[in-house]
């Protein structure tokens, strides 16, 4: 009879653990896992204490050989409590596994999303490099065209200068011919006049 207060004291943490685990709002996954583990360890301790009390009751009953109705009731209560604790432990384990699977699924989705983002970043970098390469090619071609146009302009200017020089020289040669012809005419006229006056 001295051990009944111990039973009641052992029952109270289990009940408070049940109320604390079932009704509160969802917390961060790590805190929930830690709380579930603490709850499991508490239930295991209560289970061990209850089993110890059951063994003590059984030894007392075996020593007395005759079971009193109160002892039979206590025994049934203890067995029912053990079964309840085992069921609660299983429920906590299942709940913990479900939450762990959900967290793993979220982590997997995050990893997939990160991989997709990395692929997009790499694709964007490749496109940027391709555009830079095309831009460099365009600048190179523009420089080549500029150099070619400058060279062509210089060639055209040189040709124009040469043509001008040739034209000037041709004009000069025509003038010389005209002057020579005029000079020869004057010489002839002068000669004719001289012959007339002789």
Image: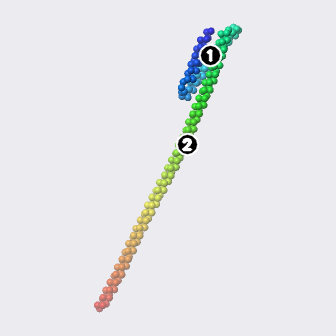
Secondary structure found at label 1: helix
Give the position of the N terminus as an image quadrant: top right
Secondary structure found at label 2: helix
Residue 160 drawn above or below residue 111 = below
- The residue identified by callout 2 is 119
Q: Residue at x 43, y 61 (%)?
A: 150
Horizontal and vertical percent position of residue 198: 29, 91
In the image, 193 versus 64, the foreground residue is 64
Label 2 or label 1, whichever comes before in sequence order? 1
In the image, 104 versus 165, the foreground residue is 104
Q: Name the side, left or right, on which 147 lies relative to 97.
A: left
Q: Name the side, left or right, on which 153 lies relative to 14.
A: left
- State the colouring used for the structure image: rainbow
Residue 93 drawn above or below residue 3 = below
Q: Residue furthest bottom?
A: 198
Q: Residue at x 34, y 84 (%)?
A: 185
Q: CA distance from mark 2 to mark 1?
A: 57 Å
Residue 56 showing in the rendered view: no
Q: Name the side, left or right, on which 92 lies relative to 144.
A: right
- The residue identified by callout 1 is 49
Horizontal and vertical percent position of residue 173: 38, 76
Among the 4 quarters of the image, the one containing residue 156 = bottom left
Callout 1: few (<14), some (14-19), or many (20+) C-alpha neighbours within 10 Å? some
Callout 2: few (<14), some (14-19), or many (20+) C-alpha neighbours within 10 Å? few
């Amino acid at each position: 009879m001295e051990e009944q207060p111990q039973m009641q004291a052992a029952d109270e943490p289990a009940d408070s653990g049940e109320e604390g685990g079932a009704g509160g709002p969802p917390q961060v996954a790590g805190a929930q896992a830690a709380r579930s583990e603490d709850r499991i360890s508490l239930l295991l301790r209560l289970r061990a204490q209850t089993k110890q009390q059951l063994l003590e009751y059984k030894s007392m009953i075996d020593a007395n050989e005759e079971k009193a109705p109160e002892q039979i009731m206590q025994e049934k209560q203890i067995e029912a409590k053990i079964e309840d604790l085992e069921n609660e432990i299983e429920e906590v384990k299942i709940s913990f596994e479900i939450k762990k699977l959900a967290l793993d699924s979220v982590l997997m989705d995050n990893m997939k999303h990160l991989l997709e983002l990395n692929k997009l970043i790499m694709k964007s970098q490749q496109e940027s490099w391709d555009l830079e390469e095309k831009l460099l090619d365009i600048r190179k071609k523009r420089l080549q065209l500029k150099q070619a146009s400058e060279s062509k302009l210089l060639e055209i200017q040189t040709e124009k200068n040469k043509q001008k020089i040739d034209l000037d020289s041709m004009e000069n040669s025509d003038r010389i011919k005209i002057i020579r012809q005029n000079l020869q005419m004057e010489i002839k006229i002068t000669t004719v006049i001289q012959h007339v006056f002789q």
